[in-house]
């Protein structure tokens, strides 16, 4: 899952967004938000087709195997994504979250509930167990919504939600660093670029003195 910057010359809209998914968010809800790349500029949609969403849910670890996704569920997934982002950006700014966005996320939580299953256990006696992990797109999206609700509704977690400090990046990320002072979505991309810019600026300053 190597993150890649979008090239300047990128035919838009994309035919499929899979090569351009960004996985530096730190948790599924934030990675979903980052499926809309370059929010500051081109706003590149990477959940282009229903098949894209099905594959993304598997890659994100919330669905075990690809399943058919309808165009309606794709639209709903994008709506969920934007509701999560609206709440996240408001939380980062210390502003009230939009009530309609909170309601939309909450509506998805019904799909994240436990799925009990009664089976014939040892000796033929009935045994109450849990069904297999998410096996449908709606339940998988419910798990993403639950991750978002946990993030947004838990103060200690909410305080670690960040927007990359790079001027040419709009990626959101969950700061898991011990000190909680991380500035870049990824040191291998934006962090290294920032270091390189500082180095070039120091060299120019030195050459001008």
Image (cartoon, grey):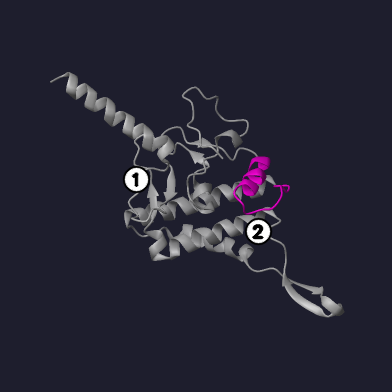
Q: Left or right of 76: which side holds 116?
A: right
Indicate whether 130 appears above or below 170: below
Q: Distance between the residues labelled 1 and 2?
A: 33 Å
Task: Give, as a single range, the part of the protein colored magenta.
Answer: 50-69
Q: Residues within 10 Å of mark 2 (few under 14, many from 20)?
A: many
Q: Position of residue 121 (x, y in %)?
A: 81, 75
Residue 145, placed above or below residue 168: below
Quarter of the image for the N terminus: give it. Answer: top right
Question: Is 67 in the magenta?
Answer: yes
Compare marks 1 and 2 and give the one earlier in the sequence: 2
Query: Which residue lies at the image location 67% right of the left edge and 42% below the top edge?
Result: 50
Location of residue 197 in the rendering, given as x and y in whole percent from the top left corner: 30, 29
Regarding mark 1 in the picture, which secondary structure is present there?
Answer: loop
Residue receiving disc 1: 183
Residue tagged 2: 139
How many marks are shown on the rendered structure?
Answer: 2
In the figure, residue 132 lies in which quadrant?
bottom right
- The quarter in which the C terminus is drawn is top left
Say whether residue 207 is magenta. Answer: no
Lateral position of residue 167 relative to residue 71, left or right: left
> Residue sitting at 40 percent across and 60 percent down?
158
Q: Residue at x 63, y 67 (%)?
A: 113
Instruction: Report the residue at 66% width, 53% height from top.
Output: 63
């Amino acid at each position: 899952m190597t993150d890649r910057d979008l090239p300047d010359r990128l035919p838009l809209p994309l035919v499929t967004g899979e090569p351009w998914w960004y996985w530096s968010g730190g948790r599924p809800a934030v990675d979903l938000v980052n499926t809309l790349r370059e929010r500051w500029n081109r706003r590149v949609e990477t959940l282009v087709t229903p098949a894209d969403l099905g594959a993304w849910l598997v890659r994100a670890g919330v669905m075990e195997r690809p399943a058919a996704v309808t165009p309606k569920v794709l639209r709903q997934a994008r709506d969920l994504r934007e509701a999560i982002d609206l709440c996240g950006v408001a939380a980062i700014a210390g502003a009230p979250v939009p009530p309609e966005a909170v309601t939309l996320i909450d509506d998805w939580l019904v799909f994240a509930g436990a799925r009990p299953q009664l089976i014939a256990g040892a000796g033929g006696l009935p045994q109450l167990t849990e069904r297999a992990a998410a096996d449908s797109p709606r339940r998988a999206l419910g798990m993403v919504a639950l991750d978002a609700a946990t993030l947004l509704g838990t103060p200690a977690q909410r305080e670690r939600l960040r927007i990359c400090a790079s001027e040419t990046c709009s990626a959101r990320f969950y700061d898991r660093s011990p000190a909680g002072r991380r500035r870049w979505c990824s040191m291998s991309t934006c962090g290294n670029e920032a270091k390189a810019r500082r180095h070039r600026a120091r060299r120019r300053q030195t050459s001008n003195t």
